Amino acid sequence: MSGGPTVATFLGADWQTLADAVGLGGIYALMAVGIGLVFGVLRLVNFAYGQLVMAGAYSLAFAFERGWPVWIGILLCFGVVLLLSIAMEWVVFRPLRAHSPAVMLVATFAVAFLLQSIALIWFGSLGKIAASLASLNQPVTISGVDIRKISVVTTAVAIVGLLVLVLLLARTRVGLHMRAAAQDFSTARLLGVRANRVISSAVLISGILAATVAVMMTVQTPLVTPDFALRDTILVLAGVVLGGMNRLVSATLGGFAIGFASGFLGGALPTDQSQYLPSFLFAAVILVLLIRPGGLFTRAGAQAVERV
Amino acid sequence: MRRAAALFELLAPALLVVLVALVGTIVSSSTETYVVAALVNVAIVVALYLFIGNSGVLSFGHVSFVAVGAWAAGILSMPVEEKPAIMPNLAGFLRDTTVGNVSSLAIAAGVGAVYALIVGLPLMRLSGLAAGIATFGVLEITHNVLRYWEKIGPGLNTFSAVPETTGLFQAAICALIAVAAAFVYQRSRYGRLLRATREDAAAARAVGVSVYGQRLVAFTLSGAVAGLAGGLYVHFLPINAESVYLDLTFITLAMLVIGGATSLWGAVVGAVAVSAVDSFLAEAENGVHLLGQTLDFPAGTRIVVVGALMALVLIVRPAGLTGGRELSFPGPGVRRLLTKFAP
């Protein structure tokens, strides 16, 4: 941003960077919830989550190219992502449910590459533009500080989305079932929780979150390529592990923290320092796995990791 | 008889490697490139097998050992006068030293082993999902550092001007060394102990096996083999940091899973079979004539097919094509047949 004569600063970074970092943290928090929900019921780390976002982004680009109104594009995005989530659950997750988490991780790794290459075949490597919401990149002025609208919108959407989710998990029957299944799947089944229904609802909700993320991410990065959201997924996975996979709250906090950190440090540090940011993030992940395997934001003693 | 059966465990994969190399001698030079690539893949997949297959612990990090091996061999074997053009910021010692082909491969193996040992010291305590994610972190960190740190390599540049010594002969020899190393290891006390921990960690610990120690031994050895494979790779193609990252991790893991992760035979079969499919599809992406038809697949078909194959194998036949078993010595029926015709 060009900036006025006086640029307000926070810890050496301007408010714009800070707002962008909060926005990115919000997006990552939503992705973390999407990954954490499925992990809770299936013990499956979905490496292919980013490809759901990618598919949503391509749907938006598809609608934009044809000049369809924004709401149709968003509708298409949700439809495609939900269909793909359900297909993924049916074709891959369900047959692999009995296998170890490591095998499932490898399988979703394969699915991620598969989907990415399908996108490459269909749409080419050059990328498509999805700019129907580009007006959100305009700044608004809040008490003398210029902030891009999208940062405000993503923050708001993330807060609302998380609140709705909390209500869903705390107040509804299916939410209760999901929490029970995440605690102890076999006991929950013994007590009458239907496994397939719980898993399907977790997958559906995580699909809705992926579609939401796709809409907001295309505003930030309108160029949609086959590796859209791949880097973000890797970072979110790191964040989820950092925060603690076993509880949704800690996973979400971890996702937000890593999004905020990479957005803020990426904007505030000079390039020759910020380019090593992924190394520090992953070193932190490894350190947490070794020292505090339950995650940073969990109570001590919560052991998520078996070790020798 | 038991000794013969044991030897067969080595001979079957070794013969397959030799056979592949022999195929390479009779085909056109453009196809020969694919054969060499297949042999390099065999070395990488055998390295993966050495650790993953014997320990049952997932690792996404082995391609980083391939990467550091490639970096070591590539930097040290590039002629001194070529270095400033490609790697202007190289540190002093690396800038002024050039070693021969064989020594560069040995150094690659050594660097791979040391790096694996350093990484393994903390990480071998982890199992299951945590091991998968932590080793993925190692891959990310290694890629990130190699990509930007120009004191120890070309950074974003490509390793051009490295002598392209990896032909059929060198690739076949190194693949055979990898197979032999894996065989010796799996027949050794260490290999057996590690497989015991894979089958039942608690029982193995109860009889005094150090799960951590045994995993560390295998990790270091497989790091050496992976480093060697990296040396081969950099002498084969002008690679860069992207060549030894996610795509290679995916394709080599796919090879191991498709072949069968728990046997040396499976690793070699998987590497050869997937390489064959992969190179056919790579040709088809450029247009190929087959049975009077012109096949012209769009770019990306290879990954789609290999990814689908991998997912399919995981769902339908999780032990892989070979069932994760070594090729068994010809059974009594075949032996009777042989003695019948023997003079």
Image: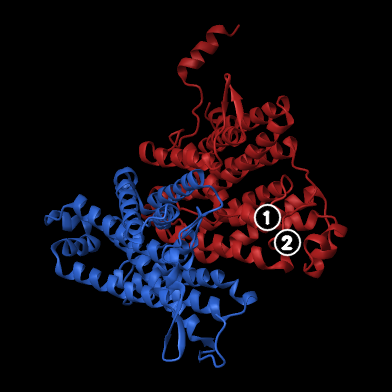
Q: Earlier in the sequence, mark 2 or mark 1?
A: 2
Q: Is residue A205 visible?
A: yes
Residue at 46% of width from left, 15% of height from top? B333
Foreground: B61 or B57? B61
Q: What's the CA distance linking mark 2 and mark 1? A: 8 Å
Tell me the number on the disc at residue B154.
Answer: 2
Q: Which mark is residue A41?
A: none
- Colour representing chain B: red
Q: Is residue B134 above or below residue A273?
A: above
Kindly identify the amino acid type of the residue bearing the numbered disc 2. Answer: Pro
Q: Give left or right: position of B76 versus B241.
A: right
* Amino acid identity at mark 1: Asn
Q: Please give the name of the residue rendered at 60% of the width and 46% of the height, measured from the top-left corner.
A: B44
Q: Nearer the viewer, residue A120 or A262?
A: A120
Identity of the residue drawn at 70% across and 39% down: B171
Q: Is residue A37 left or right of residue B184?
A: left
Horizontally, residue B90 falls left or right of residue A99, namely right
Are the residues flagged by discs 2 and 1 in contact, CB closer than 8 Å? yes
Residue A299 x, y percent position in the rendering: 31, 77
Q: Quadrant of the N terminus of chain A?
A: bottom right
Residue B340, horizontal then vertical, whole percent: 53, 7
As drawn, the residue found furthest toward the right would be B81
Q: Which residue is mark 1?
A: B240
Residue B337: image location, x then y, percent: 51, 11
Query: Dot 1 surroundings within 10 Å: few (below 14), some, or many (20 or more)?
Result: many
Furthest residue to the left?
A192
Foreground: A122 or B39?
A122
**Relative to residue B312, is residue B238 depicted above or below?**
below
Please tell me the colour of chain A: blue
**Chain assignment, label 2:** B
- Looking at the rendered structure, the secondary structure element under dot 1 is loop
